Image (spheres, grey):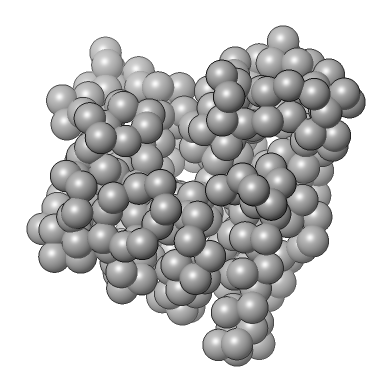
Amino acid sequence: MAVVLSERLARYGFGDGHPFGPDRHAAFVREFEARGLDKRVEVLEPRTASEDELRAFHTQVYVDFVRERSASGQGFLDAGDTPAFRGVYEAAACVVGATLNAAQAIMQGDCRRAFVPIAGLHHAARDHAAGFCVFNDCGVAIELLRKNSGLERVAYVDIDAHHGDGVFYAFEDDAAVIFADVHEDGRYLYPGTGKAEETGRGAAQGTKLNLPMPPGSDDAAFARVWPQVIAHLERFKPEFVMLQCGADSLEGDPITHLRFSPKTHGRAARELTELAERLGHGRVLALGGGGYNRANLAHAWTAVVENLL
């Protein structure tokens, strides 16, 4: 198993007063090392994704816009959640490069599974930023896995409290992307999407599974719906499994209302690993996603790593 860690990844953050601050990386690393997990995995470095790689998912106009705002460090990249800062282009491209390095290591057989803590930026759309997410590393990785590795079906599973709208709508009509998302009901939480009846469009009808949860849902509530995710993936037999394991679905997050414990994140990682092994390839890439209570993200993500191991 591989984990991507680097101070370069830590640069993706929006200042100490912002929920997505640069200290999130260090909060994870402290717990990761305290549990001795650094001795049990291969540590990979990130890299900066190229413009061509970014354009596998994003429009040229949007990539140019981020570069311009990155040079000035002024204004916002969206309606007000995601501020620009000097170097934001490079920081966001490094997140994408970290995810691509991990995916490549899996596809080359250097490891079977991997985890990237500062990654899973699932709100960014093809042509705009959203919800603390500048470039959508999940979307870029899905596009390039299919293009460069010839995969026919890639699964994207999301247990972040927020719906993975940037991934869902980018691939809503794409039957090759098997999507499953357990999230807080959009009637109560940003981005307001991910209704149960949103199951894909056209040829992709039925390949997408959205499971909105009422505020206050706990581990027991998760346990009642999670088998639907496993059954959904079993049906379509993906050749690569991506897990966005945002820790903002844990009890005590400052901006969400679910009440999961780290056990839920560990269970998701373990059962997706078992599924990938049953399918014969074992490929699981986990991405940290959200989480704004630092202790919560440290415990949830180390639980993910332990169960991927």
Where is residue 54 shown, x and y percent of the image? 70, 29
Where is residue 80 shown, x and y percent of the image? 58, 24
Furthest residue in direction top, as rendered: 61
Q: Using the image as rendered, state which of residue 276 and residue 44 is in the foreground.
A: 44
Q: Using the image as rendered, state which of residue 254 and residue 62 is in the foreground.
A: 254
Furthest residue in direction right, as rendered: 71
Any part of residue 153 in sight: no
Q: Is residue 43 above or below residue 36?
A: above
Where is residue 200 shown, x and y percent of the image? 27, 23
Tell me which residue sits at (22%, 24%) in the image. 198
Tell me which residue sits at (60%, 87%) in the image. 34
Any part of residue 258 in sight: yes
Tell me which residue sits at (40%, 22%) in the image. 169
Q: Using the image as rendered, state which of residue 60 and residue 52 is in the foreground.
A: 60
Q: Using the image as rendered, state which of residue 64 and residue 202 is in the foreground.
A: 64
Tell me which residue sits at (35%, 18%) in the image. 173
Where is residue 90 shown, x and y percent of the image? 82, 38
Q: How many marks?
A: 0
Decide if residue 256 is on the left or right side of residue 25.
Answer: left
Decide if residue 203 is on the left or right side of residue 164.
Answer: left
Location of the N terminus by quadrant is bottom right
Q: Is residue 112 above or below residue 198?
A: below
Furthest residue in direction front, as rendered: 17
